[in-house]
Amino acid sequence: METPQPRRSGPPGAPGDGPGPRARERAGDPRRNPAASGAGGSAGLAGSLAPTGIVTHAACLEHYAGPGHPECPERLTAVLRALGAETEAGPPDAECPAGTVWLQAPRADLAAIEAVHSTRLAPAIQAACLGGRALLDDGDTYVCSESYTAALHAVGGTLAAVEHVLAGTWKSAFVAVRPPGHHAEESAAMGFCLFNNVAVAARALRARGVERVAIVDFDVHHGNGTQHLFERDPTIFYGSQHQYPHYPGTGAASERGLGPGEGTTLNCPLPAGSGDREWLEALEGRLLRELEQFRPQFLLISAGFDAHRQDPLSGTRVTTEGFREMSRSLVDFARSHCGGRVVSVLEGGYHLSALAASARVHVEQLLRAV
Ligand SMILES: [Zn+2]
């Protein structure tokens, strides 16, 4: 991985390293935003507490799964605008949250990806992308020629965020990237996901000497890929709340891990129609209580906002306020148990304005991490 350096001034995109004009026209370009360089968000931070990092890359806007596909570039544009990034679509509609610093996501090295995924996966995805539009699974995980590069930046951004929080230069981070990751299995892309961003970060944290890593996944879909990658690993706790039964079909309460990893997988399935009260109860009354016993030293969040009541891909009824409360609980937990060390990574969320508002309140809570 390239050495991540937060940018506090100047354009965050390197020439020739970003998207072509098509995506910039379609979805907006964070490179055009002075705030996206950190110049706006980091104002007044000199000599103060460590900031919250926001990590993104314009290449992530170039991954295009085809017309009408819900995992669209506009999702990321909506999130970035809600966090203060200016786009070609118009002026900022919100202030860049004070206390944030923005970083261009570097490309991940293959070695980091191969610490989690089969050595066959990246070349297979790269080859499929070189051929243009392709379907990678038996569902609707489509790629285009730019998708492989986007996926490398998604992983690299997650790794960079983890490095900064581990080093203490940031107190917390939100990684606003796509494609998402939690459905990606060891040897297969799946469910709009190419590489498992959070899983690569968890494995990297272990390699850096962090003994116990927690992953909490509140995406409305069960993170089958993350669970399978760590279900035999007692050092990485995977806790998920999700609509069940629902795609991808895994995530029953009886799935608690395998062999030496038995007990460090926890699934909190919730029925269609469940809302803020049920989701908060599952998180605070079950998941975080059990996670406390695990004594994690670092918290990773698979932050999908598709349990929102407006989301087209779920039948759950969580509100933006519900995501604020869940985020507050997670950050409180990180402060009490992980020294405030928390990195949150965007997964799903397919109603653009609901996604944007939910990501905004989520980041507002991450700012409280230490
Ligand atoms: Zn999802």
Image: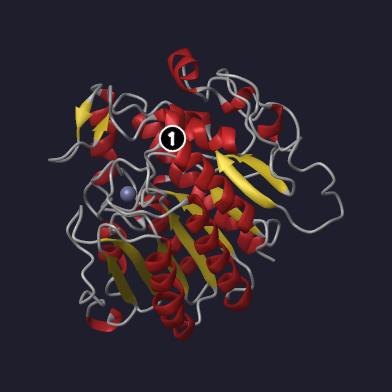
Residue nearest the observer in this picture, 315 or 91: 315
The quarter of the picture where the C terminus appears is bottom right
The image position of residue 248, as x and y in percent, is: 20, 54
Decide if residue 213 is on the left or right side of residue 140.
right
- Residue drawn where x is 52% and y is 72% of the image: 210
Task: Indicate the colouring scheme.
Answer: secondary structure
Q: Is residue 45 visible?
A: yes
Say which amino acid is labelled 1: Leu
Would you say the beta carbon of the disc 1 residue lies within 8 angstroms of ligand 1? no
The image position of residue 147, as x and y in percent, is: 35, 31
The image position of residue 95, as x and y in percent, is: 70, 37
Q: Quadrant of residue 164?
A: bottom right
- Residue drawn where x is 63% and y is 68% of the image: 340
Q: Residue furthest left?
A: 138
Residue nearest the observer in this picture, 257 or 354: 354
Residue nearest the observer in this picture, 228 or 116: 228
Q: Is residue 208 visible?
A: no
Give the crowd class for mark 1: few <14, some 14-19, many >=20 residues within 10 Å: some
The residue at which mark 1 appears reads as 352
SS category of the residue bearing label 1: helix
Decide if residue 70 is on the left or right side of residue 345.
left
The image position of residue 339, as x and y in percent, is: 64, 73
- 17 in relation to 171, above or below: above
- Residue drawn where x is 27% and y is 49% of the image: 119
- Residue drawn where x is 37% and y is 70% of the image: 239
